[in-house]
Image: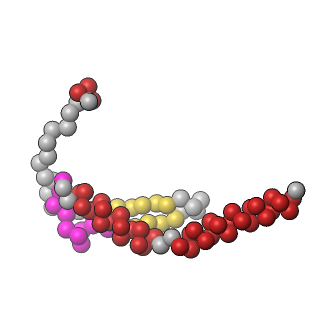
Amino acid sequence: MQKYVSTNALDRVKTALNVDKHFKPDKFAEVIKYEVLNILKEYADIRNDEFDVKIEVNEIGDYNINITATARRIKIVGIIPDKQQL
């Protein structure tokens, strides 16, 4: 039984390492940057060089996604309905 558990745990570790090996945080950050920047540009004047996305893996393996943007101005948008109207 102990050997089975060890083999099972080893397989999970190998799978996790294989997935992480193919995960490219820089590529993912570029995709997120493109998508979020396009959304934010609907609401604010933001230049591409005033926007950045960084992805870091913390000590427990979770991903911290940090987005930094500087808006020159916020665009006037429609009125958001009250919760009661939804």
Q: Residue furthest right?
A: 1
Drawn side of residue 47 relative to residue 56, left or right: left
For the question of whether residue 71 can be seen, the reply is no
* Magenta-span inclusion, residue 76: no
Residue 12 occupies quadrant: bottom right
Q: Position of residue 2 (x, y in %)?
A: 87, 59
Residue, far left: 76
The image shows residue 6, relative to residue 85, as above or below, that is: below
Q: Residue at x 26, y 62 (%)?
A: 37
Q: Quadrant of the C terminus?
A: top left
Residue at 36% x, 67% y: name it: 31
Residue 70 location (% of width, % of height): 23, 62
From the viewer's perspective, tell me whether residue 53 is left or right of residue 25.
Answer: left
On the image, which quarter does residue 47 sit in?
A: bottom left
Q: Which residues are magenta?
A: 43-53
In this view, the residue in front, 80 or 69, is 80
